[in-house]
Image: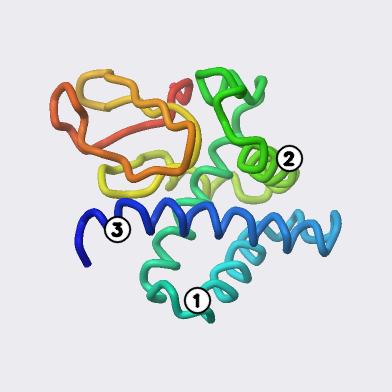
Amino acid sequence: MAKTTRDTRHPRLYDELLEKTRQFIDEADREISPKLHYAVDAAKDKIADLEEYTREEVEKIGEYLKRDLIDAARFSGDFGQWLKFETGLIEDRLLEAFSSMVDHTRLELNRIRDEADRYGEWRSGEVAGIGTLVCQECGETLRFSASSLIPPCPRCQGHRWRRAGAD
């Protein structure tokens, strides 16, 4: 698959998984909130059935979504502080879906804290949701106001990132 195709398809897939996961949680009301992994997996199955994406793509992007939701839920401050930029820069639909998922995920966080530790690193080429990442090599920051592929660091060409404020 050409790089430019992946550059647009994978962030779009991330957003579709986020929206489907939010729908599954909304449909089951509060009972499903303890089942973040189930909700994301159900959304992945629904999207994979459409055959627009390969199962491998859906699995990989679904893991990125879980990582971002868990990381955002671990942050105890204001959502704008977690993003490290003004929430007015984000589409209302995307902000609402992500915020809703973060609220549900915070409820589930105590049960999955050990698992969350493995989601502490982002790598170039992966998809990240909204927020700010910091290069682990040089400290350069990247701000995402939409789901996007993570590029190499523009300053040092590094490939390892962490969420801003995760120190």
Which class describes the residues within 10 Å of circle 2: few (<14), some (14-19), or many (20+)? Answer: some
Measured in 3D between alpha carbons, the distance from the residue under mark 2 to the one under mark 1, in whole angstroms, is: 26 Å
Q: What kind of residue is marked 3?
A: Arg
* Residue 22 seen in this snapshot: yes
Residue 60 picture quarter: bottom left
Image coords of residue 36 (percent x, y): 66, 57
Q: The N terminus appears in which quarter of the rendering?
A: bottom left
Circle on res. 6: 3
Q: Nearer the viewer, mark 1 or mark 3?
A: 3
Q: Quadrant of residue 77?
A: top right
Q: Give yes or no for contact between labels 1 and 3 (Cβ–Cβ under 8 Å).
A: no
First in residue order: circle 1 vs circle 3: 3
Residue shown at the point (70%, 60%) measured from the top left: 35
Q: Amino acid at mark 1?
A: Ala
What mark, if any, has residue 48 been given in the picture?
Answer: 1
**Neighbourhood count class around disc 3 (C-alpha, 10 Å): few under 14, some 14–19, many 20 upward:** some
From the image, tell me which residue sits under label 2: 103
Up-down relation of residue 19 to residue 107 (above or below): below
Question: Which amino acid type is marked by label 2?
Answer: Asp
